[in-house]
Image (cartoon, rainbow, N blue to C red):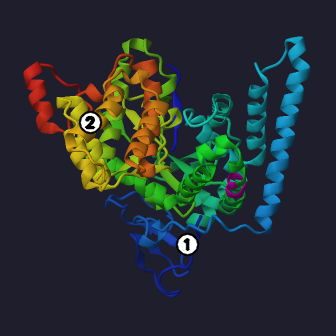
Amino acid sequence: MKSYEAGCGHFDCGGSPGSVHEAVSWWGARWDGLGRVLHENTGRNGASDGAGPVGPFAGGPPPGALHVDTPPLERFGLAELGRAVVVACALVAFVTWAILRWSVLRPMGRADCRSLVDAAAHGTVDAFEHLGPTFVKLGQLVASSPGLFPAPLADACLRMLDDVPTFPSEQARAVIEEDLGHPIGEMFSSFDDVPLAAASVAQVHGCVLRDGREAVIKVQRPGIARRMLVDLRAAYVGAKILRIFEFFRIANTPAIIRDLYNATMTELNAAVEADRQDRFRNNIGAFGDNRFVTVPEVYWQWCGPRVICMERLKGTPLDRVVREDDGLDTALLVRRGVKVWIEAVLMHGPFHGDVHAGNLWYLDDGRVALLDFGIVGELPEQWRTVLRELFRSALLDGDFSSVARSIRELGVAENLDVDDVEVGRQVAETFGPLLGRDLSELRLSALIGALVSLGRQWNTTSPEEMVLFGKQIGYFERYATALAPGWVLGRDPFVFRNVFPEEVAIRIAESGVSLPD
C-alpha cells in the first residue's frame, strides 16, 4: 500500500508587548527590546519545545484572536459589480465552448461527455477553476453534496476535490514570516518549498522544527480573505437572481451561498481552526479509549493569524486503502473513525464537518487520523439530546416515544394535536429504516430528505448543523460501501459504547460478544 504524508484558514496581530528597553514574558515567550521573540519557555500544555524564535500564539491564541469577523454579505459595490461581470462572462464562455466542442466531436465519436448536459456541467467546472479559490470551494461543496445538486454537475465537480493549483512558495514564505515575525531560517531547521497539498484557502508545506521534530505548516493564500468576500457577495446577488428558475428557487441558492459564506469566514481565521483541532484532539481520549484514532498536535509556538503549524503524520487517505490488503480489518478502521466522530457530535459538541477522503487517513502506525478542521459543526445541546435518543431507540429498544419527548422539549411539534406515541411513530417511520440498515445502503439524499419531510410535517426547520451532520454521514456511507459492507451504524454497540455505557455493557454481557479496542 502506497504511503503518503499528511498535513493538515487573516487577521493581522498588531503591536508588540513590553517596552523597548526590557524583555518581558508574554504567552510563554521571551521578547527582546525590539519586540522580537527570543525563545519560548513553554507550550500551551506547559511542555518545553526547545529554543528558537516563535510566533504570537506561543501560549495559545489570545481571546481576541478567536473572534470571527463577518462583514455584511449583502453589500454590493463597484468591486462586486466588476467581479459579477467577470463571473458571468466566464460561465457563458466556458459553457458555450464546452457545448460547441461536444457538438463537433460527438459525430466523430471523440467526445469526452455522453450528453449535452454533461458537456455543460464540465464547462461550468472549467469556469469555476478559472475563477479561482471561492468557486473551487463552491465546486467542492457541490461535489460533496450529490443529493442536493443535479448529478451531472456533482459528478463533474468531483475533480475539484483533488486538483487545486498551488501558489508560489515565495508568497507562502512571506505570509509565514509576516505572521510569525521572524525569518523562516531562524524558526525551522528546514522548510520544503514544494507544497505537500493545496486547497482553496491554503496550502501545506513540510518543515522540521529546531528540535528535530517533523511538522507541517498550513499557510493561507495571500489576499484570500478580501478576494473571497468580493466573490461571495457577487455570488449572493447572482444566487438571488437565479431564483426566477424553479430549480434554483427550490434549492434556495441564496441560503447555499450564505452557508458557504459563514463557513468561509470562520475558516479564514486560522486561530479558530487550530483551537478546534486542539480541542478535538484532547476530547478523543476523554473516556480512556480511542487510542487508535488521532488528530495532529498543534504546535502553537509557530501559529499565527494565517498560519497553523502541526505534527506531521504519514499514511494513506482512507479511500485509497484496499480492503484485501495484508489482511487489514478495514471495517474496524471505519468503525473506529465513526465512533470518535459520533462521540464528538453527541457528547463533546464540536464535530469535524468535512470528513471527505482527503481528511480521513489510515496511518502507517495503524491508527486512523482526522485532518483539517476548517469546517466544524456543533449542535445545540437540546438537538444533541434528540439525536442521542434517536440512536438509543435504533440501537436498544426501538421505542421512539423518548425521541418525541425530546422534540417536544425543543418547542417543536408542541402545537400538533397528537400525543408522544404518535410523534414517536412518525419519527420511527422516518428514521428507523435509515438508521437500521447497512450504512453502505444509506444515501445522504434520503437522510436529508427525511429531515426536510419531517420538518414540513411539523411546520419547522432543523438547525443548519443537522444538514452538516447528514452530509458527514454521507461521507461515511461511501467509506462503508468500499471498506465495511454489511456494517450497520445504528446497530453497532461499539460505536455507542461511551454514549450509552450502561446499556451497552448490559447488552454485551448478555450476548457474550467482546468489543474491539
Residue occupying the point 46% across, 36% down: 449
Tell me if residue 250 comes above or below residue 38 in the rendering.
above
Tell how many labels: 2
Residue 56 % position (x, y): 49, 68
Asked if residue 266 lies in the magenta stretch, the reply is no
Disc 2 packing (10 Å; few <14; some 14–19; many ≥20): many
Q: Amino acid at mark 1?
A: Cys
Q: Nearer the viewer, residue 414 or 209?
A: 414
- Under circle 2, the secondary element is helix
Marks 2/1 in contact by CB < 8 Å: the verdict is no
- Amino acid of disc 2: Phe
x and y percent of residue 186 in the render?
57, 60
Residue 404 picture quarter: top left
Residue sitting farthest toward the front: 417
The reply, left or right, for residue 243 in relation to residue 492 is right
Judging depth in this view, the residue of 240 and 26 nearest the camera is: 240
Disc 2 to disc 1, C-alpha distance? 44 Å
Q: Main secondary structure of the magenta part?
A: helix
Q: Is residue 375 visible?
A: yes
Q: Which residues are magenta?
A: 236-240
On the rendered structure, is 334 left or right of 7?
A: left
Mark 2, residue position: 391
Q: Indicate which label's residue lies in the foreground, 2 or 1.
A: 2
Magenta highlight on residue 239: yes
Task: Give the residue pinned by disc 1.
Answer: 13
Seen from the viewer's position, the closer of residues 379 and 431 is 431
* Residue 288 in view of the camera: no
- Horizontal side of 152 relative to 490 (left or right) equals right
Q: Quick check: 173 above or below 192?
A: below
User: Label 1: how many residues lie within 10 Å, few (<14), some (14-19) or many (20+)?
Assistant: some
